[in-house]
Amino acid sequence: MLRPQDTATREKKRLDGIWRFRLDPESRGRRDGWFSGPLPEAGDMAVPASFNDVSADPAVRDYVGDAWYQRTARVPRGWAGQRVVLHFESATHRATVWVDDHEVVSHEGGYTPFEADITEFVTPGSEVRITACVNNALTFQTIPPGTTEQTPAGPVLRYWHDFFNYAGLHRSVWLSATPQAHLDDITVVTEHDGGTGTVRYVIDGRDGDGLDVRVILRDESGAEVARGEGAEGVLSVPDATLWQPGRGYLYTMEAQLVRDDEVFDSYLQTVGIRTVEVRGTEFLINGEPFHFKGFGKHEDIPVTGKGHDNAWMVHDFRLLDWVGANSFRTSHYPYSEDVLDYADRHGIVVIDETAAVGLNMGLGGGIFGSQGYQTYSPETINDETQRVHAQAIRELIARDKNHPCVVLWSIANEPESDTEGAEDYFRPLFDVARAADPTRPVGFVNVMLAPHGKCRVSQFGDVLMLNRYYGWYVNTGDLASAEIAWREELEAWATDGKPIIITEYGADTLSGLHSVTPQPWDEEYQVAYLEMNHRVFDSVPAVVGEQIWNFADFKTTAGIMRVDGNKKGVFTRDRKPKSAAFYMRRRWREEA
C-alpha cells in the first residue's frame, strides 16, 4: 500500500474538517442502516482528532462502543478514467466504511492505514457519501488488550496500558486517484561501502501487463545520480551523502511504469542511505557507535488527544533539538507517518513500536487495580491474540520499512515475559518481524517483573530494552538504595553481551513543587532521580541509550496513582519545561 501522493500521474484530496458524528451505545446503526442516508441525530466532530475530549462531556470521554462519522465529498471531475481510492491513515481501534450504500472495507488495528478501491461506486464530478463506524472496545484478542465490564451505570472499558484510550479518526482521510495500471508497493534497502552508496529496490505494480519499471534517483538539489530498469535492481551512488543522526539527508527515488518514453504511473519515494548493525554490545549507524539520547513520547495533546497536529509536531521536534535529544520511541503504538517523515528530514532516530502494550496481568495493584486474570491462557491472551499481534507487526513494518529514521523494531512494551506461556507466545512473533524486515534489529521492552535470569523472551531480541523505576516504584524516595540495586541488576544484564537501551526511567513530578530537601513529586527530586540513574548508566559500558519516561505529561485513565494524568514528563502537557528539562539539556548537549 502506497500513501496518497501528488505526482505527474496521481492526485489526492484531503477530507479533513468537520464531519457529522454520533455515538451508538445500543449498536443500532448497522441494523438500522445509518450509512444509507444522512446520519440521524448527528452533531459535529473534527477530523483528525480523538472524539473523547472535544465534546466536553463525561459520557463521550469515557464512551465504549460504536461511534459513527459521516461526510460528503465531491470526486474531482478530472478523475474520470482513473482508479479512485479512499484511504484512512488510521481508525482507533477498528472501523467499517461505507461509500453511499456500499460497504467497502473493514480494518482491525488502531494505528496503521487501510484503504479501499471505490472506483465502481463513484462518478467523477459527483458527490459521494462516506460513512465510517469506528469502535474503541478492547478484548483479550485485540492489540492492545482490554475488556468491557458491565456495571450498574453501564459498560466500562478496563485496560492495562497506562495512557488514556483515546479513539476516533486521529489522522487524515484521503480520496486519491491513480492510473488503472499503477504502482502498488516500493521497498528500498540501503548500504554503503566507502564513499559509494547502494540502493536495492523492489517495485510492485498492478494491472501493468506490457509495461516496464524504471527508477530514477535524485539528490536534494534535484540532480539525477542513478537510474535503473526492471522491478528489482540495485542503484550505485558514487560519493553518496549518508543519512545520519542529526543530518537527515534524503535522496528521492522516482518509480515509474513506462512503455518506451510514455509514463503511465509515477511515485516518489524518499531514500536515506545508511546502515544499521548490532555488533556485540554496540549499536552502529553507518558503522559508528550510536548512543540513544531521548524519550518515550505519546501522541497526546489537550482537547484533540491523539489527533495529529502539525504545529504541535514541529514544536515537539524543536524541543527535542533544544534539549539535545537525538531519538525517541513511538511508545506505545505506531505514530502518524507525518512524524516519521519529519524525523527522516531532521535526522532524528526512532524506535518504532507496535500497539502491543498491556499484555501483562501482573501489573496490577496500585496502577490498574487487581485484575485476577492469567496473562496467557485459552480464555485470555491466546492464539487468536497472537495472530492479531503478528498482523500488527506486519502492518507496522509494511508502512514504515522505507523510513531511514527507523533503526529498531519494538514488538511489545512490558509484556509478561518470565513464563513458559510468554516464551511460546513471543518466539514466533520475532520470526514474523525478521521475515518482514531482515535488515533491522528487533527487540521488545522488558518490565521490572522479569529481571535478569528470569526473563524468557529477551533471548530472542537483538537489543535489550529495559524499563526500570528504581527510586520511584521501588526504593521510593531512597535514591542511595535504588542506585545500589539498579547497578547490580544492570551489570547482570550486561553479561548477555547485547546492547542495552534504557527505554523508560522517570519520576512523577508536579511542575512548580519545590523543596530544599528533595522528595518524590517535587522538581528537585526528579533531577536527583535522573542524576542517580545516569551514574548507573555511565558505569556500565553495554548501555547504549537512555530514553526518559516521558517527554511530556500525558492523560491516563483515572486512578489514585495519577493526578490529572501521568506527570513523569520533563515538560508539562502544554510543553512548559520543568527543572529536569534544563538538567537534561546540560547533560545531552555537553555529550554531543
Image (spheres, grey):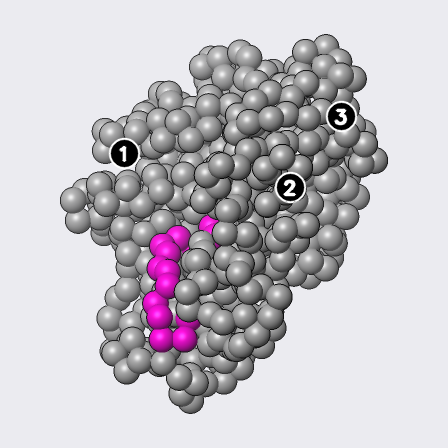
Residue at the spot x=46%, y=23% of the render? 438
Part of the protein shown in magenta? 99-113
Task: Provide residue 158's location: percent of width, then percent of height.
Answer: 33, 61
Residue at the spot x=44%, y=54% of the render? 114
Q: Residue furthest right?
A: 221
Q: Is residue 473 visible?
A: no
Q: Secondary structure at mark 2?
A: strand
Task: Provide residue 325's location: percent of width, then percent of height.
Answer: 71, 37
Q: State which quarter of the image contains the C terminus.
A: top right
Q: Is residue 207 visible?
A: yes
Q: Secondary structure at mark 1?
A: helix
Q: Is residue 106 magenta?
A: yes
- Specify which label sits upstream in the sequence, 2 or 1: 2
Residue at the spot x=43%, y=85% of the render? 38
Q: Secondary structure at mark 3?
A: strand
* Mark identifier at residue 395: none
Say above or below: 251 vs 123: above
Frontmost of labels 2 and 3 is 2
Say above or below: 561 vs 580: below
Report, in whole angstroms, how far the alpha carbon at label 2 lies from the one at label 1.
51 Å
Q: Which residue is mark 3?
A: 225
- Specify which label sits upstream in the sequence, 2 or 3: 3
> Observer-nearest residue: 302 or 476?
302
Q: Which residue is mark 2?
A: 262
Instruction: Give the residue type that dot 2 points to.
Output: Glu
Instruction: Give the residue type that dot 3 points to.
Output: Val
Report, in whole angstroms, how far the alpha carbon at label 3 lies from the one at label 1.
46 Å
